Amino acid sequence: MKRTAPVLKNETYDVDITDLTYQGMGVAKIDDFPIFIEDALPTENVTMKVIKVKKNFAFGKVIKINQKSADRVELVDKAYTQTGIAPLQHLKYDAQLEFKRHQIEEDFNKLKIDVQVDPTIGMDKPYEYRNKAQIPVRLINGKLQTGFYRKHSHDLVPIEDFYIQDPEIDKAIVVVRDILRKYRIKPYDERVNGGVIRNVMVRRGHYSHEMMIVLITRTEKLPSNKEIVTDITKALPEVKSIVQNVNPKKTNALMGKENKVLAGQSTIEDTLLGLKFEISANSFYQVNPVQTEKLYDLATKKADLTADDTVIDAYCGIGTISLSMARGC
């Protein structure tokens, strides 16, 4: 017998929030029918409006919080929730850590594996840590803008302070954006696969402070490229590498296969656990250097390796895991 959803689109309901999804959405149930609600926390009672009804679940939007969770905190910026930059910013950090621990515990339980999941090891400063940014460039109201997509869409939300990124990276994005505006570089238009500049990528060494700017273009030719490079290097003295990556395809893939060094080197250098790594535009390198060092140290300690052991680094990126483990052997 076909099940009929007990809720209707655009109707409002008072519901109790009982759980969080792995995406950080509150979970409520009406007649055992799950409703996923953004910006709602366990123990809260909210008035919500149903915005979408599917066969086995629905999505809702908070209209009013009738009973507030003790773990709720004020939003830093609503845009961080809208874009998914910080989907749990309304939840106390300690509670976020417990949420993550619980998620892992639940995953093991589903597999019927009985293990103790220790408390999540957090950060002293859980923001301004990312050493890499990949920022779309689009035309909004006739003006070149950089920012992040609204969740589940390709609608760009202009942002200058990305909250979780190294602040120097955020500053660099604004500088590059303004230079692209100065030389009237056409932003990418995905509807027709037109325009020139698709994305700006910025990497910055956590310890070295060396910076790389990657201009990802649809076209081989980047108009005024010499002037753009000159302006970037003048404005951003930390920049050691400026690369143009060409991605001509109509695709969601960020980068194409071709890299052209426009200035400086093809790589920057940074240090992780005392080891130096050369990082290219395409390198996989952990984006949270503070937590990476904690993770690798803990993994090495737990592994209790000896000189006779062999470590297989199956998805190695630039080899940070195996090389860090080799230090103690």
Image (spheres, rainbow, N blue to C red):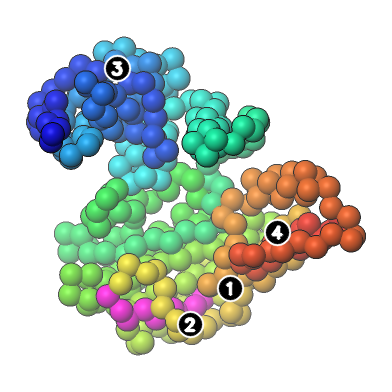
Q: Are marks 2 and 1 in contact (CB under 8 Å)?
A: yes
Q: Is residue 196 left or right of residue 303?
A: left
Residue picked out by circle 2: 259
Residue range in magenta is 242-250
Please name the residue shown 58% across and 79% down the image. 266
Q: In the rendered structure, find residue 85 and report the number of the disc placed on it.
A: none
Residue type at mark 2 is: Asn
Q: In the rendered structure, find residue 321 and report the number of the disc placed on it.
A: 4
The secondary structure type at the circle numbered 4 is helix
Q: Quadrant of the C terminus?
A: bottom right
Which percent across, then down, holds residue 202? 49, 64
| Residue 152 shows in this picture | yes
N-terminal of the two: label 4 or label 3? Answer: 3
Q: Taking 248 as reference, is 98 above or below it?
A: above
* Gap between marks 1 and 3 measured at Cα: 49 Å
Residue type at mark 4 is: Ile
The secondary structure type at the circle numbered 2 is strand
Residue type at mark 1 is: Ser
N-terminal of the two: label 2 or label 1? Answer: 2
N-terminal of the two: label 1 or label 3? Answer: 3
The secondary structure type at the circle numbered 3 is strand
The secondary structure type at the circle numbered 1 is strand
Residue type at mark 3 is: Asp
Please name the residue shown 67% across and 71% down the image. 278
Q: In this view of the protein, which residue sits in the foreground, 68 or 235?
A: 68
N-terminal of the two: label 4 or label 2? Answer: 2
Mark 3 or mark 2, whichever is nearer to me:
3
Q: Taking 220 as reference, is 50 above or below it?
A: above
Verify whether residue 248 appears in magenta: yes
Which percent across, then down, holds residue 190? 23, 70
* Gap between marks 4 and 2 measured at Cα: 26 Å
